[in-house]
Image (cartoon, helix red, strand yellow):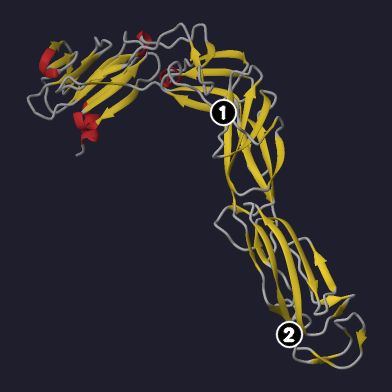
Amino acid sequence: MGAGSAFAQQYVVRGGTGDPMLAADETAYKLKVYVVNGVENVSISYTSSSTQHQWYRYKTSRLGDSEPVESTQNGTTSTLSHVEDGYGYYVDEGVSASYYVWIIDYAQHPVQFDNLAVSENSSCSGVLLQSSASIDNLRYYYPTNGLSRMLSREFEVSFNTLEWDEESLLFQEVRRTIRTNNPFSESIDSVFVDTDFVLTGDQFASHFGQPQTATVGFYETSMIALEADTTVMEDTADNMASGSEGQLSAPATVRFTAYANDPVASLYVWKIYRDEDGEDNPLVRYTDAEVEYTFTEYGQFTAVVEVSDRTGNCYQTQSFALEVAESFLDVPNAFSPGTTPGVNDEFRVAYKSLVRFSCWIFNRWGQQIYHWTDPTRGWDGTKNGKLVLPGVYFYVIEAEGSDGKRYNLKGDINILRGKRERNFESSSGSTDGSDTTTQ
């Protein structure tokens, strides 16, 4: 037979206003802690095979301050009627496996919420409930070693706040209930709207049908709820060279957006600075919830937003690290327009972080055939809508990178074909109606 079932057969606690509550079951110490509501008619009964029971009680330890107490014997059951708050009781039948009952009278340790108020902590990260009432410790002692523990009181605090909805990118107002062992010593965080507070408890009062409730009708919060994100609007062309993960290719425009708990949040400040210069030397400073900035220089940068409340005393920040890649430029030497669509049929450079770009195409006589300034684009091998003749052409490229590097490149391009096809634009600009070779 287990200790719990043996205990259940031996001791029965009755009486008080409402049913006694088993508040703790210390199996290792063969101790059960009962909370009763008033001890005037509380009794503890003990039943065993013996007709002679001697009851004892202890204050801190069975071995240290145990004393006998009187009981009423009725056959194999004896009953203890004079029960007091803050004592452990047991029957000693001369066996080592004694069991124990500790009694706490809740009527002597009630909870009262007098003059409930709310105050904000100095860091603007939470609030504290305040009351002129104190909360007694409900302490009990182990029977063999004199060590003590306390029953945990459980309270509930409800208030309105905001929760972030990632899908809608909005803060949604909700009613939140938190549980706490001591509402006057634990900070309540995330109070992001003006709200009331309702405090109820504890679980013992609720068990006896006497729950205590107190309300603070209105509290004006200063706590800031902040979410922020970025949207990068840079070139994503196939011919952009890959760099380290997360690097931006200049010019890259980034939209920075902050979301906060308006109207508590009243001032938004974005600062963007080069890391080596520090936050005190920003490149730009904006006072809007959403800003856009175009990065044109190589390096590591930080964007930080600070949102403060209507008093200017409380604020939250969030930052983003950004890195703009060094420039890169590579030029192919051959392509085959009009042959296999989508496969090497356009002359385009491979690049990264070019803030300025110009490319000219010339034929062998120095005549300009094509010019463009967007590195994401290229030349499709045509002039006046017709494919030029295969052969050697020449390019001139002038470009500048985000790192200040200048590119002045010249070279030749080979246009390749294999099959025969008519109606090409001749290299001198006139239409050549004879058969020409294409792939």
Residue positioned 9% across, 29% down in the render: 96
Image location of residue 247, percent across then percent down? 59, 53
Residue 396 shows which numbered tag?
none
User: Where residue 125 appears, x then y in whole percent?
Assistant: 52, 24
- Res 74 quadrant in image: top left
Q: Position of residue 270 (x, y in %)?
A: 65, 33
Q: Which residue is mark 1?
A: 176
User: Residue 416 has which mark?
Assistant: 2
Tell me the CA gap for discs 2 and 1: 71 Å
Does label 2 or label 1 sit earlier along the sequence? 1
Q: Residue at x 11, y 25 (%)?
A: 50
Q: What amino acid is found at the position of numbered circle 2 in the picture?
A: Leu
**Image quadrant where residue 167 sits:** top right
The residue lying toward the viewer, choosing from 111 and 267, is 267
Q: Secondary structure at mark 1?
A: strand
Q: Nearer the viewer, mark 2 or mark 1?
A: 2
Element under label 2?
Answer: loop
Which residue is found at the position 17% from the left and 14% from the top? Answer: 58
Crowding around mark 1 (Cα neighbors within 10 Å: few <14, some 14 to 19, many 20+) is: some
| Viewer-side residue, 169 vs 384 | 384
Binning the other alpha carbons within 10 Å of mark 2 as few (below 14), some (14 to 19) or many (20 upward) gives some
Left-right relation of 235 to 275:
right
